[in-house]
Amino acid sequence: MKKKLYQWVFFRLMGWKIAGALDPNIKKCVMIVVPHTSWHDFYLGVLTRGIVDLDMNFVAKKELFVFPFNYYFKWMGGAALNRKKQSNKVEAIADIFDEQEVFRLAIAPEGTRKKVGTWKTGFYYIAQRAKVPIVPVAFDYGKREVRFFEPFYPTGQFEKDMAYLQNLYQGVWGREAKNSYTPDSD
């Protein structure tokens, strides 16, 4: 019933579509969602997750996972990150992959909703350390489309890999078009 409601809101009411798919056999991955220009991206992601009907996750500081909010955050796919246990966030998040049977981590590599020309690179190193693919996802408000690209496995050639990933988002527009990702716009 909930999936039907999500489909009606997403497809009929909002006029969006989904292009591509997330292979359900990929149980662990880092999903990079670009561009991230508005708080509206949150419910767009929630609706997409409900339609695709696969678990998708996020990490947040463990201090947020206190009663009664802990139940909601866990239900939404949240995992508590103990930043005091290890000072290296990449290692701490990669350890979560080791602990979970299914963990599809959604990250906005821009790190903010403001205009950026350089991505934060933690997602790349998390995927590399956890030995999981990166699944690029575009929230293209220009085409009213959520697009799933093919999984990409980091090769260790950082600059080449980043250029490939960033190139996927050419011509993709966020809700706040002026804040959409374009390389080197800082």
Image: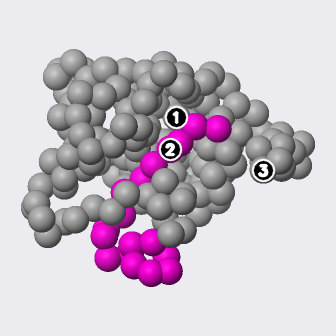
Query: Image height check: is 36 above or below 157?
Result: below
Q: Earlier in the sequence, mark 3 or mark 1?
A: 3
Residue 137 shows which numbered tag? 1
- Other-residue count near label 1 (Cα within 10 Å), few / some / many at <14 / 14–19 / ≥20: many
State the residue at coordinates (27%, 34%): 127
**Amino acid residing under circle 1:** Val
In this rendering, position of residue 48 left or right of residue 110: right
Residue 2 shows which numbered tag? 3
User: Would residue 24 be visible to someone looking at this image?
Assistant: yes
Label 3 residue SS: helix
Mark nearer the viewer, 1 or 2:
2
Distance of label 3 from label 2 (alpha carbons): 16 Å
State the residue at coordinates (39%, 72%): 65
Q: Which residue is mark 2?
A: 56
Rendering coords of residue 20 (x, y %): 62, 22
Distance of label 1 from label 2 (alpha carbons): 12 Å
Mark nearer the viewer, 3 or 2:
3
Q: Are marks 1 and 2 in contact (CB under 8 Å)?
A: no
